[in-house]
Amino acid sequence: MEFSESVINQFMADFILPFTRVSALIMTMIGFSSKTIPAKIKLGLCVLFTVAIMPAIPPTQVGNLFSLATVFLILEQMLIGLMIGFVTIMVVNTFTLAGQVIAMQTGLGFASLVDPASGMNVPAVGQFFLILSTLIFWTMDGHLTYLQFIVASFDLIPIPSTGLDSAIYKEIVEWGGWMFATALSLALAPVTAMLLINFSFGVMTRAAPQLNIFAIGFPITMCTGLLIMWLTLGNFYTHFLLQWDRALSFTCHVIGCGVP
């Protein structure tokens, strides 16, 4: 059996270009992008998923695979995958940010752990919120949803395409504002409660200056912060669902499909 040069080039284009978009998503999507997962496992997952979806996606219309235009086309596929995966990072980092705010206000910021996703030290409360939001993400099959998004993007943004609208890049940056808004709304109740407690300590200091506010207030602040965080933990899932719905709608807007 003989294969012509055009057949070989078409097969390579049908694999390399989708592989670039898929690998960009997996390397940035929450869960798969963790530094604790070996790079060989990530690469193997990208290859297996690309081979699995190749029969289901439209063939690429690339004339010359070894050209400068193909290089720019590969960069475009990488950018599309990065944008889709970046949305999941902003969803989970919303609750990491909320945990950091709560930790700093309750005096729990002294306890820090290494974040496996970024490799940086973050407060233990932020790490707890990160683990909790990641578990909910996996429980809701968020990884499968975004793998479906990347498969649907090949029909909605075929290879080659006219490119994404320049307004999309601005909207992605502006959508990051939801991360700060949701984090603030989640941390608002604990922060307000701690403000009242600190105000009470201020009144105590004025009424009885001989009290050592640092020796008394610090353990009370930490214990009260843990209690308030436990009482308000029920709001976590509600905020996650709201942020998740926004992420799904925005991802559909980016790739050009209808709102689910």
Image (spheres, grey):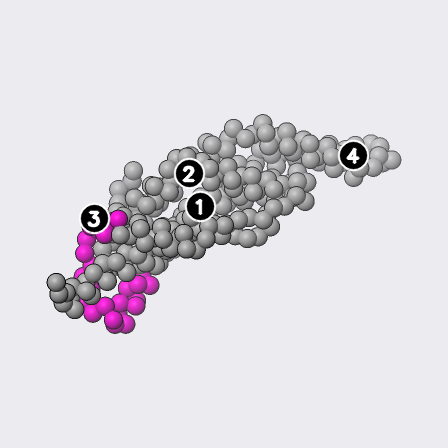
Q: Going from the N terminus, do you reach mark 2 or mark 1 first?
A: 1
Q: Residues within 10 Å of mark 1 (few under 14, many from 20)?
A: many
Quadrant in which residue 97 is drawn: top right
User: Which circle marks residue 31 in the picture?
Assistant: 1
**Which residue is the extreme one toward the bottom?**
67
- Residue 55 drawn in magenta: yes
Q: Which residue is mark 2?
A: 138
Query: Disc 2 versus disc 1: distance between alpha carbons?
Result: 8 Å
Does the CB distance between marks 1 and 4 fall below 8 Å?
no
Determine whether 130 is above or below 27 in the image: above
**Which residue is the extreme one toward the right?**
210
In this view, the mark in front (1 or 4):
1
Q: Which residue is mark 3?
A: 56
Q: Which residue is mark 4?
A: 216
Nearest to the observer: residue 151 or residue 219:
151
Residue appearing at x 33%, y 41% in the figure: 145
Identity of the amino acid at label 4?
Ile
Does the CB distance between marks 2 and 1 fall below 8 Å?
yes
Residue appearing at x 52%, y 52% in the figure: 118
Nearest to the observer: residue 1 or residue 128:
1
Q: Going from the N terminus, do you reach mark 1 or mark 4 first?
A: 1
